[in-house]
Image (spheres, rainbow, N blue to C red):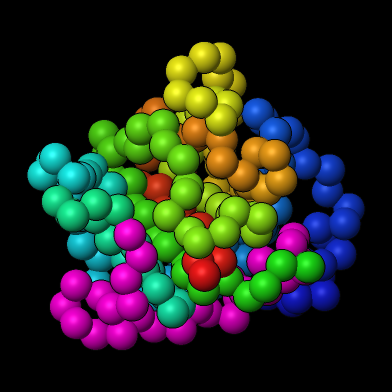
Amino acid sequence: MDFLKLNGLACELSPISIGGIDVYKGFLSISDQKLLVEELRKVAVAAPVFSPKTKAGRPMSVRLTAAGNFGWYSDHAGYRYVERHPSGCAWPEIPNLILSIWQALVPDSPKPECCLLNFYGEGARMGLHQDRDEARFEWPVVSISLGDEGLFRVGGLERGGKTASIWLQSGDVAVMGGAARLNYHGIDRIKFGSSTLLKDGGRLNVTLRVVT
């Protein structure tokens, strides 16, 4: 993946705004997506995916792992960032290919400290929620979609009320920043089998965040 090519593409593409969130449709080519998947497989080998539980003790339908200085974790004690994988090992470094996407889209932001990988298998979903476990909210969250299509729903700053939806396809990248940084959002469902990028199907969502 050529950073200069990505940087130029970021300038040429006009995002679609969905609830104030910018969605860059088709930002990544098929070849770039395949390269990313190979790099993310290495992350999953170093820090195996796991299934966190909600504060109520229910297992989430999404499996996850992470790279960077922090990963995200959830159990009866609540939602939080942690410095080590549940096994006790350190999180691997964020792949440079992932960092180049962040640099291309939000060049004025600090380097991300967490690269969170959420894997959606058949039937998995993510309810409406806010990304507010970070220390500060002026820095954006960049979200990369790989694999099967996911129905992305976006609301406002308060739970309830009007929402809007868009199908995110493999290679789409969304940027949540500015007034929309704390908007409620989630994945209603995935269209399992709609992509051949991942060998066994499913959707991989990669989000980059500044934690501290």
Q: Answer left or right for 144 relative to 88.
A: right
Vertical placement of residue 176 versus 64, above or below: above
Residue 32 in magenta?
A: no
The x, y position of residue 43, in whole percent, is: 37, 76
Vertical placement of residue 145 versus 90, above or below: above
Q: Answer left or right for 124 relative to 157.
A: left
Q: Residue at x 71, y 45 (%)?
A: 178
Residue extending furthest front? Answer: 135
Query: Of residues 78 and 22, which is closer to you in this image?
Result: 78
Query: Of residues 32 and 90, which is closer to you in this image?
Result: 90
The N terminus - image quarter: bottom right
The x, y position of residue 106, in whole percent, is: 74, 62
Residue extending furthest left? Answer: 57
Query: Of residues 167 and 30, which is closer to you in this image?
Result: 167
The x, y position of residue 35, in whole percent, is: 55, 72
Residue 104 in magenta?
A: yes
Q: Residue at x 40, y 73 (%)?
A: 70
Q: Is residue 38 visible?
A: no
Vertical placement of residue 18 versus 58, above or below: above
Q: Is residue 20 visible?
A: yes
Q: Quadrant of residue 187?
A: top left
Q: Residue at x 74, y 76 (%)?
A: 2
Query: Of residues 42 and 70, which is closer to you in this image?
Result: 70
The x, y position of residue 117, in whole percent, is: 40, 61
Q: Residue at x 50, y 33 (%)?
A: 184
Question: Which segment did they paint magenta?
Answer: 80-107
